[in-house]
Image: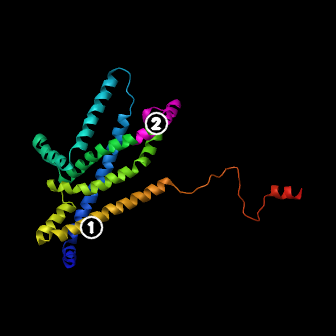
Protein backbone atom coordinates (compact mmCIF):
# COMPACT_ATOMS: atom_id res chain seq x y z
CA UNK A 1 0.00 0.00 0.00
CA UNK A 2 1.37 3.40 -0.98
CA UNK A 3 0.46 6.40 1.15
CA UNK A 4 1.08 8.66 -1.83
CA UNK A 5 -1.49 6.72 -3.84
CA UNK A 6 -4.06 7.07 -1.08
CA UNK A 7 -3.55 10.83 -1.00
CA UNK A 8 -3.78 10.99 -4.79
CA UNK A 9 -6.98 8.94 -4.88
CA UNK A 10 -8.60 11.11 -2.22
CA UNK A 11 -7.47 14.32 -3.90
CA UNK A 12 -8.69 13.35 -7.36
CA UNK A 13 -11.88 11.52 -6.42
CA UNK A 14 -13.13 13.04 -3.16
CA UNK A 15 -16.42 14.30 -4.75
CA UNK A 16 -17.32 10.72 -5.70
CA UNK A 17 -16.54 9.46 -2.19
CA UNK A 18 -18.62 12.25 -0.63
CA UNK A 19 -21.58 11.58 -2.95
CA UNK A 20 -21.39 7.89 -2.21
CA UNK A 21 -21.21 8.43 1.56
CA UNK A 22 -24.11 10.89 1.37
CA UNK A 23 -26.24 8.40 -0.55
CA UNK A 24 -25.35 5.67 1.97
CA UNK A 25 -26.42 7.89 4.89
CA UNK A 26 -29.62 8.99 3.16
CA UNK A 27 -30.73 5.42 2.46
CA UNK A 28 -29.73 4.06 5.88
CA UNK A 29 -31.28 6.92 7.89
CA UNK A 30 -34.56 6.93 5.95
CA UNK A 31 -34.74 3.14 5.88
CA UNK A 32 -34.09 2.85 9.62
CA UNK A 33 -36.74 5.44 10.52
CA UNK A 34 -39.38 3.89 8.26
CA UNK A 35 -38.41 0.41 9.40
CA UNK A 36 -38.76 1.42 13.04
CA UNK A 37 -42.25 2.78 12.33
CA UNK A 38 -43.19 -0.48 10.58
CA UNK A 39 -41.81 -2.46 13.51
CA UNK A 40 -43.78 -0.40 16.04
CA UNK A 41 -47.02 -0.87 14.11
CA UNK A 42 -46.50 -4.62 13.79
CA UNK A 43 -45.56 -4.87 17.46
CA UNK A 44 -48.78 -3.12 18.49
CA UNK A 45 -50.91 -5.29 16.17
CA UNK A 46 -49.30 -8.48 17.48
CA UNK A 47 -50.25 -7.54 21.05
CA UNK A 48 -53.94 -6.89 20.36
CA UNK A 49 -55.91 -9.35 22.51
CA UNK A 50 -57.81 -11.93 20.45
CA UNK A 51 -61.60 -11.90 20.95
CA UNK A 52 -63.01 -15.16 22.23
CA UNK A 53 -65.11 -15.74 19.10
CA UNK A 54 -66.55 -14.02 16.07
CA UNK A 55 -65.36 -12.66 12.74
CA UNK A 56 -63.00 -10.19 14.40
CA UNK A 57 -61.03 -13.07 15.86
CA UNK A 58 -60.65 -14.66 12.42
CA UNK A 59 -59.58 -11.39 10.78
CA UNK A 60 -57.03 -10.65 13.50
CA UNK A 61 -55.57 -14.16 13.29
CA UNK A 62 -55.27 -13.79 9.50
CA UNK A 63 -53.49 -10.43 9.86
CA UNK A 64 -51.10 -11.88 12.44
CA UNK A 65 -50.38 -14.83 10.16
CA UNK A 66 -49.59 -12.54 7.21
CA UNK A 67 -47.32 -10.39 9.37
CA UNK A 68 -45.55 -13.48 10.68
CA UNK A 69 -44.87 -14.65 7.12
CA UNK A 70 -43.53 -11.20 6.26
CA UNK A 71 -41.21 -11.21 9.28
CA UNK A 72 -39.89 -14.72 8.68
CA UNK A 73 -39.37 -14.15 4.95
CA UNK A 74 -37.39 -10.92 5.22
CA UNK A 75 -35.37 -12.12 8.21
CA UNK A 76 -34.61 -15.42 6.48
CA UNK A 77 -33.39 -14.14 3.11
CA UNK A 78 -30.38 -11.93 2.24
CA UNK A 79 -30.99 -8.29 1.42
CA UNK A 80 -29.09 -8.63 -1.86
CA UNK A 81 -31.57 -11.28 -3.04
CA UNK A 82 -34.51 -9.19 -1.85
CA UNK A 83 -33.17 -6.23 -3.82
CA UNK A 84 -32.93 -8.27 -7.02
CA UNK A 85 -36.39 -9.80 -6.61
CA UNK A 86 -38.16 -6.55 -5.70
CA UNK A 87 -36.44 -4.25 -8.19
CA UNK A 88 -36.47 -6.50 -11.24
CA UNK A 89 -39.52 -8.54 -10.25
CA UNK A 90 -41.74 -5.47 -9.90
CA UNK A 91 -40.92 -4.51 -13.47
CA UNK A 92 -41.51 -7.99 -14.88
CA UNK A 93 -44.61 -8.92 -12.87
CA UNK A 94 -46.39 -5.57 -12.52
CA UNK A 95 -44.71 -3.33 -15.09
CA UNK A 96 -43.56 -0.93 -12.34
CA UNK A 97 -40.40 0.93 -13.32
CA UNK A 98 -39.13 1.88 -9.86
CA UNK A 99 -36.69 4.71 -9.33
CA UNK A 100 -33.42 3.31 -8.01
CA UNK A 101 -33.34 5.52 -4.91
CA UNK A 102 -36.98 4.83 -4.03
CA UNK A 103 -36.39 1.11 -4.55
CA UNK A 104 -33.34 1.21 -2.28
CA UNK A 105 -35.21 3.01 0.53
CA UNK A 106 -38.16 0.63 0.15
CA UNK A 107 -35.94 -2.45 0.34
CA UNK A 108 -34.03 -1.24 3.39
CA UNK A 109 -37.25 -0.12 5.11
CA UNK A 110 -39.13 -3.40 4.77
CA UNK A 111 -36.03 -5.41 5.66
CA UNK A 112 -35.45 -3.28 8.75
CA UNK A 113 -39.16 -3.45 9.64
CA UNK A 114 -38.98 -7.24 9.88
CA UNK A 115 -36.12 -7.08 12.38
CA UNK A 116 -37.58 -4.13 14.29
CA UNK A 117 -40.91 -5.95 14.67
CA UNK A 118 -39.20 -8.64 16.75
CA UNK A 119 -37.21 -6.05 18.67
CA UNK A 120 -40.39 -4.13 19.50
CA UNK A 121 -42.20 -7.32 20.47
CA UNK A 122 -39.42 -8.10 22.92
CA UNK A 123 -39.62 -4.55 24.30
CA UNK A 124 -43.37 -4.82 24.81
CA UNK A 125 -43.06 -8.20 26.52
CA UNK A 126 -40.44 -6.74 28.89
CA UNK A 127 -43.01 -4.26 30.30
CA UNK A 128 -44.57 -5.56 33.50
CA UNK A 129 -48.05 -7.03 33.12
CA UNK A 130 -49.20 -5.03 36.12
CA UNK A 131 -49.00 -1.87 34.03
CA UNK A 132 -51.40 -3.32 31.47
CA UNK A 133 -53.77 -4.35 34.23
CA UNK A 134 -53.58 -0.94 35.87
CA UNK A 135 -54.37 0.78 32.56
CA UNK A 136 -57.38 -1.45 32.02
CA UNK A 137 -58.53 -0.76 35.58
CA UNK A 138 -58.77 2.98 34.87
CA UNK A 139 -60.67 2.40 31.62
CA UNK A 140 -57.95 2.56 28.96
CA UNK A 141 -58.34 0.44 25.84
CA UNK A 142 -55.46 -1.42 24.19
CA UNK A 143 -54.32 1.40 21.93
CA UNK A 144 -54.48 4.02 24.69
CA UNK A 145 -52.42 1.74 26.90
CA UNK A 146 -49.85 1.30 24.17
CA UNK A 147 -49.57 4.98 23.27
CA UNK A 148 -49.54 6.50 26.75
CA UNK A 149 -47.90 3.82 28.90
CA UNK A 150 -46.15 1.03 27.01
CA UNK A 151 -44.60 2.56 23.89
CA UNK A 152 -42.73 5.38 25.71
CA UNK A 153 -40.97 2.69 27.75
CA UNK A 154 -40.46 0.45 24.72
CA UNK A 155 -38.83 3.21 22.67
CA UNK A 156 -36.27 3.78 25.42
CA UNK A 157 -35.64 0.07 25.92
CA UNK A 158 -35.10 -0.69 22.22
CA UNK A 159 -32.90 2.33 21.50
CA UNK A 160 -29.62 0.33 21.71
CA UNK A 161 -30.99 -2.37 19.39
CA UNK A 162 -32.30 0.29 17.00
CA UNK A 163 -28.89 1.94 16.93
CA UNK A 164 -27.30 -1.42 16.18
CA UNK A 165 -29.74 -1.93 13.31
CA UNK A 166 -28.86 1.54 12.00
CA UNK A 167 -25.16 0.63 11.94
CA UNK A 168 -25.99 -2.62 10.13
CA UNK A 169 -27.99 -0.69 7.53
CA UNK A 170 -25.05 1.63 6.86
CA UNK A 171 -22.91 -1.38 6.01
CA UNK A 172 -25.60 -3.38 4.21
CA UNK A 173 -26.37 -0.60 1.74
CA UNK A 174 -23.27 -1.84 -0.08
CA UNK A 175 -25.30 -4.74 -1.51
CA UNK A 176 -27.64 -2.30 -3.24
CA UNK A 177 -25.01 -1.66 -5.90
CA UNK A 178 -26.45 -4.73 -7.68
CA UNK A 179 -29.46 -2.62 -8.74
CA UNK A 180 -27.34 0.41 -9.64
CA UNK A 181 -27.58 2.48 -6.46
CA UNK A 182 -24.67 4.92 -6.45
CA UNK A 183 -23.81 4.49 -2.77
CA UNK A 184 -20.29 4.40 -1.34
CA UNK A 185 -19.38 0.90 -2.49
CA UNK A 186 -20.58 1.62 -6.04
CA UNK A 187 -18.60 4.88 -6.20
CA UNK A 188 -15.49 3.21 -4.77
CA UNK A 189 -15.72 0.44 -7.36
CA UNK A 190 -15.86 3.10 -10.08
CA UNK A 191 -12.82 4.90 -8.64
CA UNK A 192 -10.87 1.65 -8.40
CA UNK A 193 -11.77 0.74 -11.97
CA UNK A 194 -10.47 4.10 -13.22
CA UNK A 195 -7.05 3.97 -11.55
CA UNK A 196 -6.63 0.19 -11.09
CA UNK A 197 -5.66 0.75 -7.44
CA UNK A 198 -8.27 -1.45 -5.78
CA UNK A 199 -6.61 -1.86 -2.42
CA UNK A 200 -6.01 1.83 -1.84
CA UNK A 201 -9.47 2.81 -3.12
CA UNK A 202 -11.31 0.37 -0.89
CA UNK A 203 -9.07 1.27 2.03
CA UNK A 204 -10.41 4.83 1.73
CA UNK A 205 -13.97 3.43 1.60
CA UNK A 206 -13.23 1.33 4.69
CA UNK A 207 -12.17 4.44 6.60
CA UNK A 208 -15.31 6.30 5.50
CA UNK A 209 -17.56 3.43 6.61
CA UNK A 210 -15.79 3.37 9.97
CA UNK A 211 -16.20 7.13 10.42
CA UNK A 212 -19.93 6.91 9.69
CA UNK A 213 -20.62 3.96 11.97
CA UNK A 214 -18.44 5.28 14.79
CA UNK A 215 -20.11 8.71 14.65
CA UNK A 216 -23.58 7.18 14.71
CA UNK A 217 -22.64 4.97 17.65
CA UNK A 218 -21.30 7.92 19.65
CA UNK A 219 -24.40 10.02 18.95
CA UNK A 220 -26.75 7.22 20.00
CA UNK A 221 -24.76 6.58 23.19
CA UNK A 222 -25.04 10.28 24.01
CA UNK A 223 -28.82 10.16 23.48
CA UNK A 224 -29.06 7.08 25.71
CA UNK A 225 -27.20 8.85 28.52
CA UNK A 226 -29.49 11.86 28.22
CA UNK A 227 -32.57 9.65 28.42
CA UNK A 228 -31.16 7.84 31.45
CA UNK A 229 -30.83 11.11 33.38
CA UNK A 230 -28.14 11.87 35.97
CA UNK A 231 -26.32 8.89 37.46
CA UNK A 232 -26.21 10.34 40.97
CA UNK A 233 -29.27 11.98 42.43
CA UNK A 234 -30.81 12.32 45.86
CA UNK A 235 -34.43 12.13 46.86
CA UNK A 236 -35.47 15.40 48.50
CA UNK A 237 -38.67 15.59 50.47
CA UNK A 238 -40.79 18.45 49.16
CA UNK A 239 -41.66 19.46 52.71
CA UNK A 240 -38.05 20.13 53.67
CA UNK A 241 -36.66 23.58 52.94
CA UNK A 242 -32.91 23.85 52.76
CA UNK A 243 -31.64 27.26 53.82
CA UNK A 244 -28.32 28.90 53.28
CA UNK A 245 -26.01 29.17 56.29
CA UNK A 246 -26.67 32.31 58.28
CA UNK A 247 -30.23 32.68 56.99
CA UNK A 248 -32.21 31.10 59.80
CA UNK A 249 -35.96 31.07 59.52
CA UNK A 250 -38.06 33.10 61.90
CA UNK A 251 -39.39 29.95 63.55
CA UNK A 252 -35.85 28.80 64.28
CA UNK A 253 -34.93 32.15 65.75
CA UNK A 254 -38.04 32.20 67.93
CA UNK A 255 -37.30 28.70 69.19
CA UNK A 256 -33.76 29.75 70.10
CA UNK A 257 -35.05 32.78 72.02
CA UNK A 258 -37.49 30.65 73.95
Farthest right residue?
Answer: 258
Dot 1 surroundings within 10 Å: few (below 14), some, or many (20 or more)? few
Q: 137 and 196: which one is in front?
A: 196
Q: Name the residue under label 1.
A: 207
Q: Name the residue under label 2.
A: 145
Dot 2 surroundings within 10 Å: few (below 14), some, or many (20 or more)? some
Q: Is the magenta stretch mostly helix, strand or loop?
A: helix
Instruction: From the top left corner, tell me how far across and down residue 72 is, in percent.
Output: 25, 39
Farthest bottom residue?
Answer: 4
Label of residue 162 in the image: none
| Quadrant of the rendered image containing residue 209 | bottom left
Instruction: From the top left corner, tell me how far across and down residue 101 is, in percent.
Output: 21, 54
**Side of 198 relative to 213 (left or right):** left
The residue tagged with tag 1: helix, strand or loop? helix
Whether the magenta-drawn stretch holds residue 129 is answered as yes
Quarter of the figure that contains the N terminus = bottom left
Q: Which residue is drawn at 17% across and 69% down?
A: 199
Residue 93, above or below 164 = above
Query: Disc 1 or 2, which lies upstream in sequence?
Result: 2
Q: Give the range drawn in magenta.
A: 123-144
Q: 139 and 205: which one is in front?
A: 205
**Side of 229 relative to 63 (left or right):** right
Amino acid sequence: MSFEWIVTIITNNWPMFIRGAGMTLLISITGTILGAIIGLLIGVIHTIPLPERGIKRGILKLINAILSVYIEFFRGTPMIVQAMVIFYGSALAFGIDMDVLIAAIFIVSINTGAYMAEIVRGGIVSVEKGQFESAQAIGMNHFQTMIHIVLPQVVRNILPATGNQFVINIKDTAVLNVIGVTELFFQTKSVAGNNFRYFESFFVACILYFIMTYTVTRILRFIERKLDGPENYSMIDNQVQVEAPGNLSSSTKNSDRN
